[in-house]
Image (cartoon, rainbow, N blue to C red):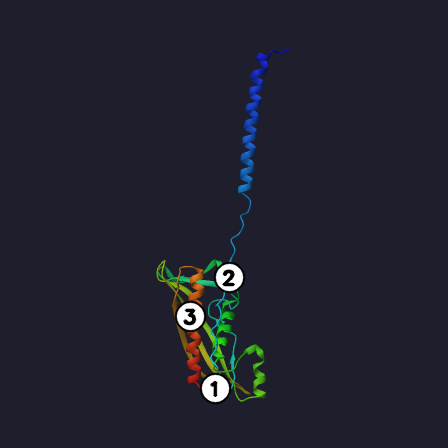
Amino acid sequence: MISTSLRAPWGRRLQGAGRVALVAASVVVLAACSALPQKPHPVARYDFGPAQAPVSPSAATAGAEPLVLANVRAAGVPDASAAIYYRLAYADVRELRPYTQASWVLPAMQLIQQRMRDVLSGQRAVVLDDDGATQLLRKTGYPAMLRLEVVDFSQVFDSAQSSQGVLRVRATLSEITPKGERWLSQQVFQAQQPAASPDAAGAAAALAAATDQVAQQLDTWLRQQKR
């Protein structure tokens, strides 16, 4: 028969081993929990906001030939890209960087085209190239075709806290004839608007304002071209 004096040390050892095993199991559980994938941060999505109410066409322009707006193209950036881009002019202005936690709701070129159509239609009828523009030749004279190539559309940082939204566009105006397009004029337009904050929200607001400014410049230019 084993005495109680011999059983006591073994009991304490078993209890100690049990506590060690419990602590080890807790550590394994905590490590497993920390290894679980974290919930991803939602991506903020921006557009240009509501457009200003268009001005009613004047009597002189109400009967003008419609303007055909071609699909807006981008130079150096995929046309289908919805990324909001920025540049660090104080580091390397040539490097175009996308915000990873923010984007446009649609491809940027599509948003620009929509806003240009909204603004330009205040003084003339504006149809998109994919609306069947060639059918206009059967009903009207020679409508004008406006092609826009976006050279730059980015938030440019002069310093870590100071930036502006920059839009630079090359506009080409031609006339649609039965024999093809006849070149009329070409000009580069640019606008920059200060960003209220050094982030994607500031970029979206500044770039939208720059787009509105370029649209007004285009409207003035087209009226000078009698279009």
Q: Is residue 27 left or right of residue 87?
A: right
Q: Which mark is first along the chain, 3 or 2? A: 2
| 159 in relation to 210, above or below | above
Q: What residue is shown with label 1?
A: 61
Q: How many marks?
A: 3
Q: Position of residue 126 (x, y in %)?
A: 52, 80
Q: Nearer the viewer, residue 97 or 23?
A: 23
- Inspect the image, locate mark 2, and give the three-letter code of the amino acid beneath it: Arg
Name the N-terminal-most of marks 1 and 2: 2
Nearer to the camera, 160 or 125 = 125
Q: Quadrant of residue 150?
A: bottom left
Question: In this picture, is 141 found above or below 12?
Answer: below
Identify the residue shown where x is 49% and y is 59%. Answer: 102
The spot of residue 146 in percent (x, y) is 49, 79
Q: Which residue is mark 3?
A: 210
Give the CA distance from mark 1 to mark 3: 26 Å
Q: What residue is disc 2 on? A: 45
Three-letter amino acid code of the residue under disc 1 = Thr
Q: Mark 1: give few (<14), some (14-19) or many (20+) Cα within 10 Å.
A: some
